[in-house]
Image: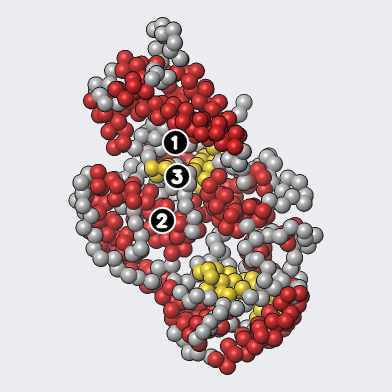
Amino acid sequence: MHPAILRNTLLSRASIEKILSMPNLSHIYGNIEELFRNFEEKKKFASEIHTEIHLVKPVLKLLGFSYESKPKFFEDHVKSPDIALFEKDKARLEASKVWGTEDYYRRTTAIVFIKRYGRTLEKGISGFYLDFENRIPIFQTLYIMKKTKTPWGILTNGRNWILIKRPLDFEETVIEIDLEYPYTSPEQSPFHPFFYLFSPEGLLKTIPELLEEERKNLSYLLKIKKDTLINGIKGKEKKVDVYPVIYDTYREIFEDGSLPETEAYLNEKNIKLNLKSPVKTDTFNPYITPQIFTYVFSMNGKQSGIDIQSILDKYFTGKIYTKETLLNLKILEMTPNFGSVISSIVEGIAYKSFIVPYNEKNTFVAEWEDERALKKYILDNMLYGVERSHIVYDMLKDAILKRFGLYLKNFKLGNPLIGMSLKDIANHINTKNQMGLFTKNPQEIISELRIMFKQYYTLSDRIKEDLEEKRKLELKIKKYCDRIKDAMDIITASYFISGVERKKIQGLLLNLDEDESYWETIRKTDWFIEAKQVAKKNGFFHFEIELPFLMNDAFDIIFIQPGLIYLWENELPVVEMTKAYIKRGASYLKEDGMFVIIAKGFEDKLMEELIGSKKYSVERIDDIIILCKKTG
């Protein structure tokens, strides 16, 4: 990658290399560089208008554009683009006849947003009269691009130039170049890739041709890899036989990747990975990793898109819809797979948060007006998930890292359909037997645990006394959580194996507050060890223990993809799977929450089955089915 390219989600490395190998147009680069030298003295005091007149417009002219300043936009509360770009004067003159309309913008080659020289392009800045101007600049550009159907957007502060492809949904396919990157040789000049990407020929010919070439090459290569994978796993059903074959295919796509959970699982089974040498390839755009994984490793090879805006609008019907209420949602993905839906949720919420207002005017939360910090906030505070497959769990984390450069914090490995809720424990307590004088009722311990978690989350990491109290609570919480998890594992395992008698379960529940010596002894018994092995093998997942915020809270929205089948799995009945996910998730959904079922290919069948539900109202939006709890 060229060192002056700061961000690239638009093209593969191979495409960038092709651009860098194109003929050197030093006379044009020299003219652009001279503009920057002449602008040097104006940098310190350059306003937005100075940047536009003395730098941006002259650069656009050297690139070969015809342009029109301050084109009228058809929404009064939104600042118009600074410049509309056209390939030729003739196109500009023709478009001027429909100035200020949607048709005008459709005829543009690109629109340009200009910020004062050197201003950050990733963060909003408070203090502007228009709320729109306070917000994240790239979302300002995306908003008008989505409204106008213009194919390209350019966002610049004079030094940094970001080229933005019009999104189909809310994805950000962009490339950013630093035109003041210090270089010591002609091949390092930032003006070479800049010209071939940002010129009219770049937007209308070079980039579209490269993208089409990438699409064809990618389709061809991935089809070969999928066919090879299908042949490689044919006749194999056990994970220990299937995972090594899948790992090989994964490494052929991304040679620098690793799958730690998968490796740990295979090591436990004494399976040595004899991986082929990775195939170095630069033809894959890492940004589309979720789609690549979905195509290669899922049964149908396609990931249906989701209209996250319509889903959010439906959820907030009759509710207060502000930035605060939006960014305080808790969302569960019960079938996260390779991250396509999660990516859509992150990008959709980030964009939607740009549109909705704060509760109170003149509010400005810096974390929410910083593009990267906002997406990290969404992943860290709003999204949760449970993935059933070791190797898919690894790929999911890898896909999100490659798309956003961020780690998944609240996604766990386990089977979301097998486990218990804390309220289920009451069914296993024998209240007829009198408890010991110093024995605590399990329900009392669970209530105390809920209080401890509530207290834990109110304590500060910055106050010394709070930090000390927090550490004490951590030890106590861990002790009870470990013991309750053990008890829940044993209870659940009793449905899988014999030998776990009711009195043994009673013993665990009535001794949750016992000395550690009791638990050390119990954990060494054969029946306990066997039950825990069953729990691990089947991925028992107890939501409140694994996601502790559920001790005192619940989810607002739960996403389900019941028809999703991995290439190495047997197909399961969609209707029954849907009902199972709904039944399991219902315990963790708020009364005014909703299930979102991604039902592409099964819409009619599921609607027919669910429409008569006594518990839920059912609504369909294209291939999405929404279930809300009935009230009254």
x, y percent for residue 177:
56, 74
> Relative to 416, is 65 above or below?
below
Q: Please identify the residue farthest to the bottom as the structure is shown.
A: 27
Which residue corresponds to mark 2? 398
Secondary structure found at label 3: strand
Residue placed at 49% from the left, 86% from the top? 185
Residue 125 in view (yes/no)? yes
User: Sequence-wise, which precedes: disc 1 or disc 3?
Assistant: 3
> Relative to 260, is 449 above or below?
above
Which residue corresponds to mark 3? 411
Q: Nearer the viewer, residue 511 or 401?
A: 511
Q: Quadrant of residue 438?
A: top left
> Relative to 206, is 76 above or below?
above
Amino acid on which disc 1 is placed: Glu
Q: CA distance from mark 1 to mark 3?
A: 10 Å
Which residue corresponds to mark 1? 546
Residue placed at 31% from the left, 64% from the top? 252
User: Sequence-wise, which precedes: disc 2 or disc 1?
Assistant: 2
Structural crowding at the residue carrying mark 2, measured as other residues with C-alpha within 10 Å and reported as few (<14), some (14–19) or many (≥20): many
Secondary structure found at label 1: helix
Q: Please identify the residue farthest to the right as the structure is shown.
A: 129
Q: Please identify the residue farthest to the front as the structure is shown.
A: 464
x, y percent for residue 251:
31, 61
Amino acid on which disc 2 is placed: Asp
Structural crowding at the residue carrying mark 1, measured as other residues with C-alpha within 10 Å and reported as few (<14), some (14–19) or many (≥20): some
Residue placed at 56% from the left, 49% from the top? 378
Q: Nearer the viewer, residue 494 or 515?
A: 515
Residue 589 lies left or right of residue 418; in this view the side is right
Q: Quadrant of residue 520?
A: top left
Q: Nearer the viewer, residue 436 or 149?
A: 436
